[in-house]
């Protein structure tokens, strides 16, 4: 069953900026989806429309079979966590947990207390006085413990150090296994969440570029390296995501993986190196505006 349905979804802001451009996607119930894309791709805009914070300009969007904007049903069954969250300055941190327990029907206070103590928060401290990383950690505690049917994390680890990020992902996964729900995580750190998510949604220029299981994404492309002429002959007619020249006669290319095992064997016999591509690198290649790297800028800027 789909919890979220978007059809030809567009969002334009005053001034003419188009954040989403006829985006179509369906997100299933009780899955963890990783939302990936470059800055400005439309990730936060999409999440805020899904959460009911923004109204779409055109197209259709439904969450729990309702239009999310100003929907009480969507508000009551979802939570949106990001680094811009604010709380009343009158309440201390532990009081905020108590209020969250009263507000969210599925809130697990035992879990919230455990995480609160594990991350060594002072119950009498105030949210506005926390560091950026501490704020993100506290917000994450609320997001996990709330156990909302739709839980949205928009760059939830901003400011966290590496150890805290790992603890957050592990806590989220363990609680998801115990209490499944639909979770969307927007992150720049695909390498950190690829073992957590089940699906990946990659958006580019406000559109859905790829939406598939992470297991398929890891095999979506391959890297080929070898003599330039041999590589060029081998990738002719293929979808090329990235190419780079090393020296005068060596080439490295990343292409869509639609080769057979026999073709791989022939490529190796021709002296080519075949290797997998890291998920994080593949995301960069897929969302680049060109097929080359930063070196291309310098190669074309030398004085004649």
Image (cartoon, rainbow, N blue to C red):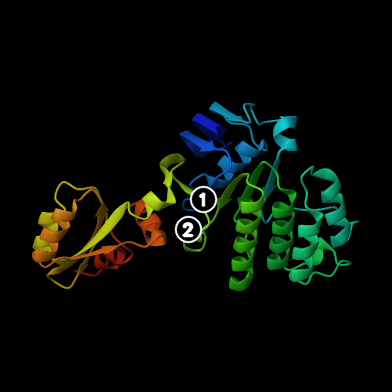
Q: Is residue 27 left or right of residue 101?
A: left
Q: What is the residue that sits farthest to the front in this orientation?
A: 178
- Is residue 291 in view from this perspective? no
Q: Is residue 158 above or below residue 239?
A: below
**In the figure, residue 295 lies in which quadrant?**
bottom left
Observer-nearest residue: 54 or 106? Answer: 106
Q: Is residue 21 above or below residue 136?
A: above
Question: Badge 1 is on which residue?
Answer: 34
Q: Could you say whether the residue bearing mark 1 is in a helix, strand or loop?
A: strand
Q: Residues within 10 Å of mark 1 (few under 14, many from 20)?
A: many
Distance Cα–Cα, label 2 vs label 1: 8 Å
Question: Badge 2 is on which residue?
Answer: 194
Residue 81 position, x and y percent, is: 68, 51
Residue 49 position, x and y percent, is: 61, 37
Quarter of the image containing the N terminus? top right
- The residue under the point 69% across, 58% down is 140
Q: Are marks 2 and 1 in contact (CB under 8 Å)?
A: yes
């Amino acid at each position: 069953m789909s919890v979220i349905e978007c059809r030809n979804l567009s969002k334009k802001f005053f001034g003419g900026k188009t954040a989403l451009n006829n985006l179509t996607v369906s997100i299933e119930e009780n899955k963890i989806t990783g939302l990936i894309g470059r800055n400005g791709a439309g990730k936060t805009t999409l999440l805020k429309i899904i959460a009911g914070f923004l109204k779409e300009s055109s197209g259709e969007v439904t969450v729990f079979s309702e239009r999310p904007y100003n929907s009480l049903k969507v508000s009551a069954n979802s939570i949106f966590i990001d680094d811009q969250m604010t709380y009343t300055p009158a309440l201390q941190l532990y009081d905020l947990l108590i209020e969250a327990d009263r507000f969210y029907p599925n809130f697990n206070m035992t879990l919230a207390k455990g995480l609160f103590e594990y991350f060594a928060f002072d119950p009498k401290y105030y949210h506005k006085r926390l560091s950026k990383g501490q704020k993100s950690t506290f917000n994450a505690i609320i997001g996990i413990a709330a156990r909302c049917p739709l839980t949205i994390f928009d760059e939830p680890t901003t400011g966290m150090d590496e150890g805290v990020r790992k603890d957050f992902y592990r806590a989220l996964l363990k609680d998801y296994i115990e209490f499944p729900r639909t979770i969307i995580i927007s992150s720049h750190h695909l390498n950190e969440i690829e073992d957590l998510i089940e699906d990946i949604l990659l958006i580019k220029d406000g559109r859905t570029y790829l939406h598939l299981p992470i297991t398929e994404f890891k095999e979506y492309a391959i890297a080929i390296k070898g003599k330039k002429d041999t590589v060029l002959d081998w990738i002719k007619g293929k979808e090329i995501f990235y190419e780079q020249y090393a020296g005068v006669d060596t080439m490295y290319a990343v292409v869509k993986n639609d080769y057979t095992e026999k073709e791989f064997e022939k490529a190796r016999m021709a002296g080519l190196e075949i290797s997998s591509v890291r998920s994080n690198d593949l995301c960069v290649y897929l969302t680049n505006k060109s097929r080359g790297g930063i070196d291309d800028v310098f190669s074309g800027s030398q004085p004649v």
